[in-house]
Image: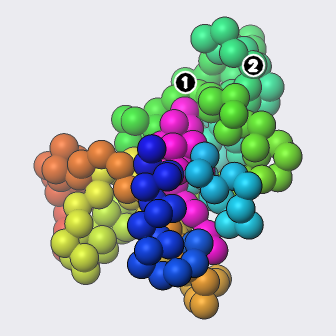
């Protein structure tokens, strides 16, 4: 439903489809909710994974970027595994992205090149959280702040293309944590 509504609203506002779609990816439901309405179109679709604190296992939850094929919860997909092949310990500043795998549909679309993977680390995510809050008055959930961070980088690379970012959740659940651990004066 989210993708259908976004498609209709973007067409109504601009007369065109977006050139780029950006959504955060943990398990992938947020991204697939948006992407499903655009799969047959020429839009570039970016799923943004949590880059966390680094690229070592346990410092991130970027399964599409650093994972391999495996089975979790009865489905075959891409996952982060420990040395015994079991689901690895993962980390994300956003609890909703703290997951060692991704849904099989998203993994498939990525494997055929229909979607692309982006990464936003913690510092970029916090900066995006503050920037969107400050400039637009929208407090994003930390999950969606990953997508905003990547979209900000993408906008610099593609200044003449449209970018539709999927914002999910509510940032008010994260604001106390962010302000206490990442003082605004360090980011604004």
Q: Is residue 54 visible?
A: no
Q: In the rendered structure, which segment of residues is drawn in magenta?
A: 19-35
Residue 130: percent from left, percent from top:
27, 68
* In the image, residue 155 above or below residue 141: below
Numbered-mark total: 2
Q: Quadrant of residue 133?
A: bottom left
Mark 2 element type: strand
Q: Is residue 173 above or below residue 116?
A: above
- 10 Å crowding of disc 2: few (<14), some (14-19), many (20+): some
For the point 30% across and 71% down, the residue is 132
Name the residue furthest bottom: 160
| Residue in front for this viewpoint, 15 or 35 | 15
Q: Is residue 131 visible?
A: yes
Task: Find disc 2 in the rendering and name its residue.
Answer: 76
Query: Residue 145 at x, y = what percent?
Result: 39, 58
Q: Quadrant of the C terminus?
A: bottom left
Q: What residue is shown at x 61% (from left), y 22% (from top)?
A: 88
User: Which residue has dot 1 on it?
Assistant: 89
């Amino acid at each position: 439903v989210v993708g259908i509504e976004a498609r209709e609203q973007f067409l109504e506002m601009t007369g065109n489809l977006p050139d780029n779609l950006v959504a955060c990816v943990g398990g992938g439901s947020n991204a697939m909710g948006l992407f499903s309405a655009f799969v047959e179109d020429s839009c570039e679709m970016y799923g943004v994974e949590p880059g966390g604190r680094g690229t070592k296992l346990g410092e991130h939850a970027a399964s599409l970027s650093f994972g391999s094929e495996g089975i979790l919860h009865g489905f075959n997909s891409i996952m982060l595994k420990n040395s015994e092949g079991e689901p690895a310990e993962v980390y994300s500043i956003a609890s909703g992205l703290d997951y060692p795998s991704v849904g099989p549909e998203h993994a498939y679309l990525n494997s055929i090149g229909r979607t692309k993977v982006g990464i936003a680390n913690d510092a970029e995510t916090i900066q995006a959280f503050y920037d969107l809050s400050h400039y637009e008055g929208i407090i994003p959930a930390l999950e969606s702040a990953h997508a905003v961070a990547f979209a900000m980088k993408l906008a610099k690379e593609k200044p003449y293309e449209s970018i539709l970012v999927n914002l999910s959740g509510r940032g008010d659940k994260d604001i106390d944590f962010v302000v206490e651990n990442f003082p605004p004066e360090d980011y604004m």
